[in-house]
Image (cartoon, grey):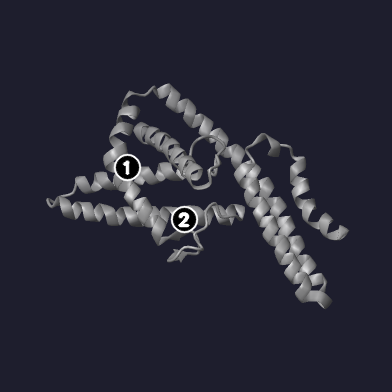
Amino acid sequence: MEKILFFLIVYSFLGWSFEMIYNIIKSGKIRNTGFLLGPFSPIYGFGALGIVYIDYLFKNISIENTFVIGILVLIISFLYTTVLEYITGFLLYKIFKIKWWDYTDFKYNIKGYVCLRYSLYWTILSIFLLYGIHPFVINIVENGNKIIFYLIFILIIIDFVYTVIKLYSFKNIIEFVLDEADRKISVFKFKRKKIKKEMEVVKTEAIKNYKRFIVNFHKSEYKNSNILEKLRDDFFDKKKKK
């Protein structure tokens, strides 16, 4: 059980690092798009743990043909990473009303939570993980300082609690903005089409700002609670002045 916890910590860090490098290459900017404040991404940790366990199970069953085992590991890895990503994305959206990632523009996607292209990417990364990364991770876990691992785990728990509290406050603000937008659409019935179009723009801008807020709220400039009120007021005060 102890090793599983340590594996989770190491792979959460490696996953976060991978995502940071990917974002730098893709956008040229350093952005923490992970769920937590610190340099850890739990979805990668649980994903890697599942892949390692799947590989372990197949290596201990009575199938002599290694090619068959390899194909089975590939298929199960594909299904596992796809289901994990879908469930994680679905729950985050249901709880916080925002998608941390959105594959809507990709072919063969399921509600934007997963798509064929990225599921194949995760499968390829799974193979690289098993045969390229995991041997080194085993060495880190077996020779690492247990006290440090436990301290990191405690920090991750604190980070998780802090993040959830912050995100709930943002969730309340965005719900207010969207509810207000819907209310304004229903009030101005005599200009329903025009108002509806304008308020749809407001809702879109609100969501964009919310996404920016979620991505960057760990930065110091967003820690002042007054910014929460400003996010709400920006949309409707400007509309009144026009």
| Residue farthest along the right direction in this orientation | 241
Disc 1 is placed on an element classified as: helix
Quadrant including the N terminus: top left
Q: Residues within 10 Å of mark 2 (few under 14, many from 20)?
A: some
Q: Is residue 110 above or below residue 130?
A: below
Q: Amino acid at mark 1?
A: Leu
Q: Nearer the viewer, mark 2 or mark 1?
A: 1
Q: Position of residue 235 (x, y in %)?
A: 77, 56
- Residue at the (33%, 52%) spot, across then down: 123
Q: Quadrant of the C terminus?
A: bottom right
Q: How far from the left and from the top, in percent, is residue 49?
A: 36, 42
Q: Residue furthest left?
A: 64
Vertical arrangement, residue 109 with respect to residue 87, above or below: below
**Residue displayed at 70% across by 56% down:** 206
Residue annotated with mark 2: 87
Q: What amino acid type should be assigned to the residue bearing mark 2?
A: Ile
Q: Would you say the residues marked 2 and 1 are in contact, meaning their CB atoms lie under 8 Å apart?
A: no
Q: Regarding mark 2 in the picture, which secondary structure is present there?
A: helix
Residue sitting nearer the eye, 4 or 48: 48
Q: Quadrant of residue 177?
A: bottom right
In the rendered image, which quarter is residue 160 located in? top right
- What residue is at 37 percent from the left and 51 percent from the top? 122
Number of callouts in the render? 2
- Asked whether, in this view, residue 45 is left or right of residue 99, the answer is left
Sequence order check, earlier mark of 2 and 1 = 2
Residue with the mark numbered 1: 129
Q: Residue furthest bottom?
A: 190
Q: Position of residue 5 (x, y in %)?
A: 40, 35
State the CA–CA distance, disc 2 to disc 1: 22 Å
